[in-house]
Image (spheres, helix red, strand yellow):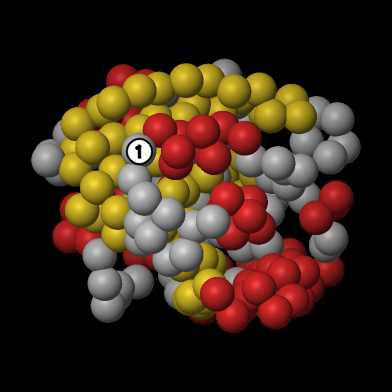
């Protein structure tokens, strides 16, 4: 899909489905929170959540006292849902409606978090653009969560690209050093299992 088709697709997903109807929903994104805390940075660290949609991660980051949070998603509808859920607290967050492969940040980030966005990039061109943007705009660490080699091959009706610890490290080796990788079995709202690999990286 081109950018326009991709945007329309995801706007429709978030327009027509509630959190309990999409596989990626987590009540509490504990693995992501643990990785972010393990960076050991202050509460004023600049954090961006790539493909954050209406994820609950931003809620927990605010509760933890983080003060410099950006959420990016291609779907403006997803971001509106998150804003509505947060109420007045949404004013404490920067919201960016953009395709990550066309994102032109106006600042750099201490922590770059991405759970289940990167694996939707299935062409070498898309992956290359993502790497380039990440290398130029991350000053600290990156946390990536993708479907593992034991995970699904599709999500929300779209093909994805599976990874494992070795292939993620190889993909980002030009600009990042792998710190730690784990696997996680995510139980979806409809009680199916998805195996993820999560890796943290340090910017070289």
> In the rendering, at what x and y percent does residue 81 appear?
73, 72
Can residue 192 be seen here? The reply is: yes
Q: Dot 1: what SS?
A: loop
Q: Is residue 79 rendered to the left or right of residue 96?
A: right
Residue 120 versus residue 6 in the image, above or below: above
Q: Which picture quadrant has residue 12?
A: bottom right
Q: Is residue 84 rendered to the left or right of residue 10?
A: right
Residue at image location 72% in from the left, 70% down from the top: 86
> In the rendering, at what x and y percent does residue 147 appear?
54, 32
| Residue under pointer 1 | 40
Crowd band around label 1 with a 10 angstrom C-alpha radius: few (<14), some (14–19), many (20+): few
Residue at image location 83% in from the left, 62% down from the top: 17
Relative to the observer, which residue lies in front, 93 or 4?
A: 93
> In the rendering, at what x and y percent does residue 144 appear?
42, 40
Residue 204 versus residue 132 in the image, above or below: above
Where the C terminus falls, by quadrant?
top left
Residue at image location 84% in from the left, 51% down from the top: 21
Residue 82 versus residue 127 in the image, above or below: below
Can residue 50 be seen here? The reply is: no
> In the rendering, at what x and y percent does residue 113 appear?
44, 49
Please give the count of numbered marks on the rendered protein: 1
Residue at image location 47% in from the left, 64% down from the top: 67
Residue 178 versus residue 89 in the image, above or below: above
Q: Is residue 151 rendered to the left or right of residue 43?
A: right
């Amino acid at each position: 899909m081109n950018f326009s088709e991709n945007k329309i697709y995801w706007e429709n997903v978030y327009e027509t489905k509630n959190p309990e109807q999409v596989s990626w929903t987590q009540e509490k994104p504990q693995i992501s929170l643990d990785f972010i805390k393990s960076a050991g940075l202050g509460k004023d660290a600049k954090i961006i959540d790539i493909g954050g949609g209406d994820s609950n991660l931003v809620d927990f980051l605010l509760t933890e006292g983080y003060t410099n949070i950006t959420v990016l998603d291609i779907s403006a509808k997803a971001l509106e849902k998150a804003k509505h859920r947060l109420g007045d607290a949404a004013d404490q967050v920067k919201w960016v409606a953009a395709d990550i492969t066309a994102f032109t940040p106006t600042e750099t980030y201490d922590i770059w978090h991405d759970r289940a966005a990167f694996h939707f990039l299935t062409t070498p061109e898309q992956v290359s653009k993502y790497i380039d943007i990440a290398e130029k705009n991350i000053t600290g660490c990156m946390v990536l969560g993708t479907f593992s080699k034991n995970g699904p091959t599709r999500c929300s009706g779209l093909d994805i690209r599976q990874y494992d610890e070795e292939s993620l490290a190889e993909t980002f080796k030009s600009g990042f050093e792998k710190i730690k990788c784990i696997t996680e079995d995510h139980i979806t709202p409809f009680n199916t299992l998805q195996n993820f690999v999560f890796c943290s990286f340090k910017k070289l």
